[in-house]
Image (tube, helix red, strand yellow):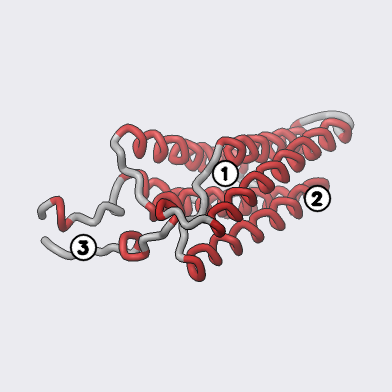
Amino acid sequence: MNSQGRNKNLNVPNLLTVLRCILVIPLVYYFMDRNYIAALVVLAVSGLTDMLDGWIARQFHQFTELGQMLDPLSDKLTQAAIAICFSIREPILIPLLAVFVVKEVLMIAGAIKLISKNKKKPSGSQWYGKVATVLFYLSFGVIFALSIWGKGDYFVADVTLLSVTAAFMIYAFVRYAKIYFKTIRSDDPKYNLDIKEVMDTKKKS
């Protein structure tokens, strides 16, 4: 097969991203089955794929528009699964879950509008989005660990973690919203979405 006929969306970073989406299934299964060690292992593997796909894409210049859309989607699926599972066990996490759900629903709706109506690219992950993700995992992990293995009242620590994380998630949403409106209003071709490239399939052998 020559290089011109090769589907450039079939690369290692994209495959790792798809794997991360699939790992949501065993993650939820093990967590709801109270097999927390297995769930933690699955989550660790998921986090490793998250780091590797970006590193490989940068090192080997394997960035694609499909990958830029799949990466945040896989992050959202994983976060949603964790948030829902943890909130079932620890009701104090429900307010943070609500902030997360509202933020992600609005961002997904915006991305759909950009792609379907405006034919433009949704924003890729930014540093503030990554920080919000790290705080999200940290808060849920610490609060859950304290509830399972800790002793005593950790209400103040829980509220502090939830408040900081929720505040940064809102901050990230505002920053992404600015990019969204800038993209909507811009005539710069760099924001245009090449649908043919995203849906590219093998044409030549």
Q: Is residue 188 visible?
A: yes
From mark 1 to mark 3, how far is it between C-alphas?
Answer: 37 Å
Q: Residues within 10 Å of mark 2 (few under 14, many from 20)?
A: some
Horizontally, is 98 left or right of 124 in the view?
right
Residue at the image point whose x is 50% and y is 38% from the top: 47
Residue 160 in the image, given as x and y percentages of width and height: 82, 33
The numbered dot on residue 202 is 3
Image point 68% across, 50% down: which residue? 83
Q: Which mark is residue 39?
A: 1
Image marks 1 and 2: residues in contact by CB distance under 8 Å = no
First in sequence: mark 3 vs mark 2: 2
Q: Which residue is mark 2?
A: 95
Q: Closer to the observer: label 1 or label 2?
A: 2
Location of residue 31 with respect to 201 vertically, above or below: above
From the viewer's perspective, is the residue at label 1 or at label 3 nearer? 3
Q: Residue furthest front?
A: 187
